[in-house]
Image (cartoon, rainbow, N blue to C red):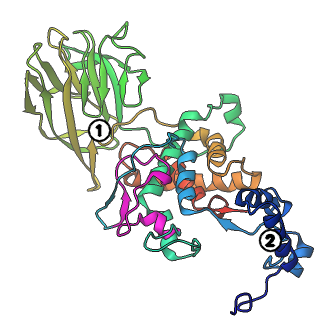
Amino acid sequence: GEFGKLGSLPSHPELLDWLASEFRESGWSLKSLHYLILTSTAWRQSSFRDPARDAIDPENRFYWRKSLQRLDAEVLRDRMLVASDTLNRELFGPPVAIKEDDTGQVIVDGNQTRRSLYIRVRRTQPVAMLQSFGAPVMKINCELRPVSTVATQSLIMLNGEYTIEQAGRVADRVLRETPLLNEAELSRLPSFPQVPQPVWSYGSGRIDEAQGRVIEFVSLPHWTGGQWQGGENLPDSRIGWVLLNAQGGHPGNPRFAAVRRWIAPAKGLLSISGALHHPVENGDGVRGRIVSASRGVIGEWNVHHGTIDTMQSEFAVESGETIDFVTDCREHENSDSFQWTVHLTLKTEDGTVEEFDSSGQFHGPMPDPRQLPSQIDSAWQFILLRHPSPEELNSALRFAERQLSTLNEHNANVPAGSSATRQVLVNLCQMLLNSNEFLYID
């Protein structure tokens, strides 16, 4: 036949002859052959490009260096999970289900933390991200994994739900694990644009019945990751059961009501809609009141095992004026968990209409933008496994400064429940996940 005659000649015929001889001498042991290849200098060599050798063999036909190699599809997905510290390293178990999203793309259904090895494989439903980056299609035997560079890969990395989700998780890891710089260290760093103060805050307090104003307001000090409360354990030794979360909360005794505070960002006309719900028959229910810093109590409702609307028609507010949503226990704090979500509409003097949602905009501690330099360094380590160079750090800081300015001017672009500083980190992390250094082995 024509075996060995078709195609181009091998670049290293003597090496192939020697490998064939060694293969035979080892008793045709594939294990020995694999060990020989994988422990060789040629296999383990660096990808460093020597200018003199590069001039002779720029295409690396003679294998004088390791060639540039993109991460395999499954490795790329798993590497993002490692960067966000969410990879589930558990072995074995059932396959992870897949489904079609609203656009028709096949994605992982539910928890996105298991290794790609455990994703269910269906011939008619290849996972969009894995397929785009060359995962084998299980219609025929895969003798060689295809490597291609196509536009859909960039689109998935820029707009894909999975990539954006992992960028957010890396940013949250950065905020969680980066040590805070002290004031002396912060004074040596470049300044950043001031971030607008959040319009929502969460605390305890009580109403002066004679004046109709909230007094003794104290911010709740402990954030659990999902709610604000008085301390690490409940009930707190000082304020008891007071807590606030996205949907509602729980008051303390008659001296400590749960107070969700909104601060008007501008002068205008404010209207309020919402509903106060007490879910159980036990206890004596709760009382909800809306208190304006300038007008006093403007709405009051008692509810026990039911729901009541808490609407307020338009009234004038000044910039910086506080509107408090105060929930107290009436007489007894037993079984006083409640839900109270409100929606505020502010019409400013220039005709702008701003919307505020107590549930969607619920947030934990707001990051300090002055900490961004150390947080950027952490993001580099988590994603690229190294510190940024001084030039890279300066470039990233300029990027962060521009992003902060833009987000401060257009606050509507900040997702609900996030902050401008966190969104800057999310955008930076997504940029690093899209870098060639992350995507390729070099």
Which disc is residue 89 wearing? none
* In this rendering, position of residue 437 left or right of residue 264: right
Q: Which residue is mark 2?
A: 20
Q: Amino acid at mark 2?
A: Ala
Quadrant of the image occupied by residue 365: top left
- Give the residues in magenta: 105-133
Q: Please give the name of the residue rendered at 72% of the width and 37% of the height, measured from the top-left corner.
A: 188
Quadrant in the rendering for residue 233: top left
* Residue projecting furthest to the top: 237
* Residue 172: % across, % down: 50, 41
Between marks 2 and 1, how big is the CA–CA gap? 86 Å
Return the residue at label 1.
318
Q: Is residue 114 magenta?
A: yes
Query: How many C-alpha atoms fall within 10 Å of the one at disc 2: few (<14), some, or many (≥20)?
Result: few
Q: Main secondary structure of the magenta part?
A: loop
Q: Residue at 13% x, 29% y: name it.
A: 277
Q: Nearer the viewer, residue 65 or 256?
A: 65
Q: As displayed, is residue 195 above or below residue 37? A: above
